[in-house]
Image (spheres, coloured by chain):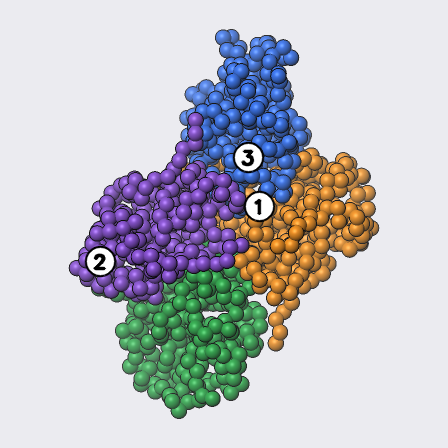
Chain colours: A green, B blue, C orange, D purple
Amino acid sequence: MSALPYTIEELITVALAKSFKDGEVGFTGLATGGAAALYITGIPLAAMELARQTHAPNLTILLAGWSINPDFSEIRNLPSAEFDSGLQNLPCEAQMESYPGPYAVRRGDVDFGFGSGVQVDRAGNINSTCIGDYRKPKVRLVGSILLPEHMTCFRREYIMMPHHEVRSFVERVDYVSGVGYPGGEAGRQALGLTIGGPEWIVTPKCIFEFDRVGGRARLRSIHPGIGPDDVRRSTGFAIETDGIPTTEAPTAEELAILRRKVDPHHALIPHGGE
Amino acid sequence: MSALPYTIEELITVALAKSFKDGEVGFTGLATGGAAALYITGIPLAAMELARQTHAPNLTILLAGWSINPDFSEIRNLPSAEFDSGLQNLPCEAQMESYPGPYAVRRGDVDFGFGSGVQVDRAGNINSTCIGDYRKPKVRLVGSILLPEHMTCFRREYIMMPHHEVRSFVERVDYVSGVGYPGGEAGRQALGLTIGGPEWIVTPKCIFEFDRVGGRARLRSIHPGIGPDDVRRSTGFAIETDGIPTTEAPTAEELAILRRKVDPHHALIPHGGE
Amino acid sequence: MGRTSKIASLQEAAAIVRDGQRLALGGFAIYQRPMAFVRELVRQGRRDLTIVGVVNAIEADLLIGAGCVSRIETSYVGLEKFGLARNFRRAAEAGTLDTVDYPELIAWDRFRASQEGLPFWTCTFLGGSGIVEYNKDIVPFDCPVTGRKLWAVPPAAPDVVVVHAVMGDEYGNVAFHNRKMLPQSVDITHTRSCDTIIVTVEKIVSGKEMKRRPDLVEIPALRTTYIVEAPFGAHPTSLLGIYDCDDDAFLDYAAASATPETFGTYLKRTVHTPGDHAGYLAELGVERLLALRNVELPA
Amino acid sequence: MGRTSKIASLQEAAAIVRDGQRLALGGFAIYQRPMAFVRELVRQGRRDLTIVGVVNAIEADLLIGAGCVSRIETSYVGLEKFGLARNFRRAAEAGTLDTVDYPELIAWDRFRASQEGLPFWTCTFLGGSGIVEYNKDIVPFDCPVTGRKLWAVPPAAPDVVVVHAVMGDEYGNVAFHNRKMLPQSVDITHTRSCDTIIVTVEKIVSGKEMKRRPDLVEIPALRTTYIVEAPFGAHPTSLLGIYDCDDDAFLDYAAASATPETFGTYLKRTVHTPGDHAGYLAELGVERLLALRNVELPA
């Protein structure tokens, strides 16, 4: 990777940014600590801001769900806590002071969100609740949190997986915290779900998209420098790697805007080059 | 009446005050103009404050539903508007700034309220919606407003009728804006109503209470100086006037507290004597 | 690429309301009503509107008197201390207006149902009322948990919501009073219940100025369709802390609405002849507007 | 007759919680938790509690680790940046804790259902989730209006609610921050969902002082059962604008909860040995508390 003039995080950031349309509303939580924070918060914020500064000036950022269009160009580090004065005093356009707040999440106000879990399966279900049987779990995790809403009330979800490993990419999750495409779009309809569902699964190795008829994850692109075998070996469900394009490299101009205007203090993601 | 050392409003105020228990929560709207304002706002406020200053120091006043325990000892006139700066700046303990507010009306937080209408019937139903057939009304009035909630979510309701006339006291209201005791308490249960209902009907001539088994208004007391015939002739449904006691006259001490401490500037009700 | 301005003229904004739509007008009773917008709707001759509201007053009565409304769903139509809403009353009695009654809190909850994307709001206390006797949009059902008798109340489902507020920016961020009262609370709920939101404001300020108090921005730009500058846009109703109710104008209205004829003359004088909101304000005159204004020492 | 004071000691207030009750503890995640109250419950050896919450953290994990809890209904139990809630995890894996999962917004709506006196809250989006697969308290039903598949979610129905706030008066009027964040919003909803409300506050002030900002009183006296003065009562969690999160204390907690044995030692050291909240604060020491304190220039 070191041969590339950009980091994998920059690659993903640019790919995400290009997928956002002008006028959309994007929601991201404030995760803290290491790779999770990078994939759930840093990359999404950088991607949304890059979109705002290029083709999507009317995109709305919902940071931690409640700080609307925050201005983080001056910060040196992401705040480490959601509900402390630091984030309260981060300049922004509007704040949610009470629930339910100034956007109507269950009317479909949120176009896309970013979520993660310890497991994702081929149907795009994600799990943040437990490993093993729910009633007698091998490992009990934090719970579903907002994932049910991410996967059914938002219009689409980017599943962000900081570790692409067989144990995380499974045939069937042990618990469905957020529901994907079981049975495809018809399956979601039958479950009473009218909008939403996973759009991509983003990993350090590749990007998945979904066959919405069959309800199966399939590769959309493999990152530069990553071999198809590596991707197959890291994924616990069968995938086709033939003919999958390489994730489009960011242009020099995109990188320049990202590094100089979006994240000048490297507070959001690691940067390469220069 | 002029022979009495108190006004009819003072008489009613004291009778009401005595019926409130310590710790209860009373709700009254802010009506404006003449007799309606007196019966729906002035008398209730005076009665609740008298109770607070005598046997019920923990009684809570909800003025206009949103100003909690207002201090009106300094005002010369009741504010004429609910949502202007005047009432916003009236000293109080708490204010409701948004709906649903700081008390849980549908959990039963409100012990009693005061309501009125153009018609009340023998079952205690009240009507503020129309005269004649609802679908082709002879007179269309303002609508049900909060009366449905008064008569079903509050634990009891004092129906305040500033005019005691045959046309207002009818056998059956033309429209049930607030439901009384049709079929008695059993009737209310069958309608799915678990709490509440009319307690008294208060008029310039008398006070009604309810036979809760039969679901019928009956006289509780007739005001001093009013003849039983007068009450019967003014009431459009049959009532028994034999053996009905006279409404208890206020004591000198009660009148003194009412006039000097509760309403020193005669902002709430007309006062007699002195 | 630059960010899109959502500034529109009153004419442009009113033009997106179509005949036959469901319209919710912000404010509560005789407070903070988007009256400049209402007058523009009358000028544009909109017809067959359904007004969906909580507690309605002059904003509804004026539209009814101008022949714009065929149906109203609310808990109250009246002018409070200024008396009955006579156009409303006449139309209801004549059978030209379909009146659909709701209890006050439930009328409010219907907007919450729309905000929450719920197919209905659950009500426990309607048994025996005229509401359920005559309002067939309310569906009785048995509680799936307790078996108790319940009623499913339909969402407000407005097609267009219009509110009048103090200030906003060109992108459509709109701030509300720090100390709110219920009219402001109604507005906030209204603007979350619908995807076409028009906000008229006393003043459009810069985005930078708005960013000083992001905690007071209750309508974020993402929810706003149009923002319209309409100073004294609530007149003759009050705007809390900005200007008082114009009692004389209300008395004039109440008297003029006594008959269809006198009300026609009133509409001609106050709505059509002035031609637009600027003309309306000019007609009122500087002295009168300034007398209604609230002033306080800058913080 | 004088008005009744609702002031109680922490011991008196905690004593009204009975074994087996449903308890909701204010705050959100690792923010503004009524920790002084929680520690007193541990001292009193309460058992078999059900914690009902929205997003839970140390307040739940501590009670679980102390053996006070047999069931928890929530969307999350964890320590955010301080890691997993290890007592919770251990108890869930051992089968000694009944875990009942809800989505985050629905966990919040359950308190709204209690506030509104509704027999259930309607949810539209649970199909296919583990939530409905395993949580049998959620009842599927067909929409009485549209026929659409829906779920009836049970109200939170807490028996006792405890929140920690900045200030209140002896009658139980409690004020909240002018600029709120979601932990304050949770507290406000919690205190309207139940009829037994205990509020611990940093300081009890005079009723006269409280009357200066009636608009900030979100818990009126009528809803308060007990008010308890407990300075730094949220420690080690933060109280917005008053003191910061004590990161060292959290790291100590996280490390101590690694095993039942080390956690037993931790409870002895921080809960039982200090004897009461004053002892707990004395143990922390003046220097540490003042270092956590926020100060700003008086207005």
Q: Residue at x 75, y 38 (%)?
A: C251
**Discs 2 and 3 share one subunit:** no
Amino acid tagged 2: Tyr
Residue D266: image tag: 2
Crowding at dot 2, Cα within 10 Å, few <14 / some 14-19 / many 20+, comes out as some
For residue D168, what is the image quadrant?
A: top left
Mark 1 or mark 2, whichever is nearer to me: 2
Q: Residue furthest front?
A: D287
Q: Is residue D201 visible?
A: yes
Crowding at dot 1, Cα within 10 Å, few <14 / some 14-19 / many 20+, comes out as many
SS label for mark 1: loop
Would you name the residue on which mark 1 appears?
Answer: C181
Q: Residue furthest top?
A: B242
Amino acid tagged 3: Asp
Amino acid tagged 1: Met
SS label for mark 2: helix
For the N terminus of chain D, the image quarter is top left
Q: What chain is tagged by disc 2?
A: D
Q: Residue furthest left?
A: D261
Give the spatial CA distance, label 1 vs label 3.
18 Å
Q: Residue furthest bottom?
A: A3
Q: Residue at x 80, y 39 (%)?
A: C262
Residue B71: image tag: 3
Crowding at dot 3, Cα within 10 Å, few <14 / some 14-19 / many 20+, comes out as some
Would residue C232 appear left or right of B125 to someone viewing this image?
Answer: right
Residue D155: x %, y % from top left? 38, 46
Q: Is residue A111 above or below residue C182?
A: below
